[in-house]
Image (cartoon, rainbow, N blue to C red):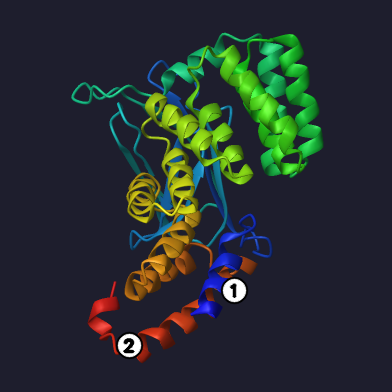
Amino acid sequence: MRRLGLTIFLLASGLLVSANAGAQDRVTVSGNVFFQDQTHPAVNVLVTLSNSEQVTISTEATDGSGGFRFSALKRGTYTVAINVSGYTPVTLGVDMNFVSDRGMPIYLQPNTKDKTSAPGTVSTHELSMPEKARDLMASGKKKLYKDKDAAGGLADFHQAISTAPDYYEAHYEAAMAYLTLGNRGEAEKSLRKSIEVSADKYGEAEVGLGTVMVDKGDYASAEKAIRRGIELNPNLWLGHYELGRAFLNEKKISDARDSAEQARLLAPSAAVVYRLLSNIHLRQKDYPALLQDLDMYLKLDPDSPAGARAKQLREQVQQKIGTNKFTPAVIAQ
């Protein structure tokens, strides 16, 4: 049992590593997502790519220009899906048998039957920023997230803030760059500044601050900040995930499970959610559920170092289930 706990701890620590580093590029599906007016880009909207058997291959969040890109795909037929609260769900079939690169614009139409507030306000605020600041923001996000150049991204974010001091999204991105560089002190300052400049209306910054508080062990402050972030943006899966992480550290296992399940419903293709669920089900000694968590994790992240550890852990869980004589039907997906 002690060995199981150690392996789970190793699985839960560290950042996810992309499994696609060594993949050979074949075909690419890309595009840009806009709101109905065709000018406002849909930023941080989840785009899901599935194969012809409707098995999810990858999920990505759109960048500052509403862009998404899935590369290194085999030739075949795919489905692009977007489901944003307040807008009509979008599902598009894409035939990549005879082309190597296909881009597409996607326009989100308001769903009059869904009165839930939609995420267009953030994009509207960004659009109100000076063009120079927005260009610096886009450049910084590319450097941070695509080029893995956190220092270069941070420099662009600071320039954007100098151009537009009330650009609270830029303060938030600066915090993400600081976190990547391992400077949690400056990250916390940037997150608090983002909250201040936004007049406490930016959920992502509240959740980011809560994440820093979890890592510092200040779980009461973390819970307060994350709850505020979820209040501002109920569909922010990361908020529910981080709240579950805070609860788990506080040994509030039932609350942690509820938050993790909500994160899973909102982001079923986020591998890190299944890492959290693995920890929770381990604490509950629910080994069949733990095995299912690991199976899902391995579908999403099979080849990274964390995935390799998950494979080892799965073998240990299987042995544990065998020892306790759980029947295969119980653990079947």
- Judging depth in this view, the residue of 114 and 158 nearest the camera is 158
Q: Residue at x 73, y 34 (%)?
A: 185
Residue 328 occupies quadrant: bottom left
- Amino acid of disc 2: Asn
Return the residue at label 1: 308
Can you tell which quarter of the image residue 155 is in?
top right
Residue 236 is marked as none
Q: Which residue is drawn at 41% across and 22% down?
A: 35
Is residue 321 something that shows in the picture?
Answer: yes
For the residues bearing labels 1 and 2, Cβ distance under 8 angstroms: no
Position of the C terminus, as image quadrant, is: bottom left
Q: How many labels does the image show?
A: 2
| Residue 194 in the image: above or below residue 185 | above
Q: Which mark is residue 324?
A: 2
Q: Is residue 31 above or below residue 267?
A: above
- The image shows residue 112 at horizontal and vertical percentages of 21, 21
- Name the spot of residue 202 as percent of width and height, x first: 50, 21
| Residue count near mark 2 (Cα–Cα under 10 Å), binned few <14, some 14–19, many ≥20 | few
**117 above or below 298?**
above
Seen at 62% across and 60% down, the residue is 20
Amino acid type for the residue under numbered disc 1:
Ala
Identify the mark nearer the N-term, 1 or 2.
1
Residue nearest the viewer, comparing 110 with 251: 251
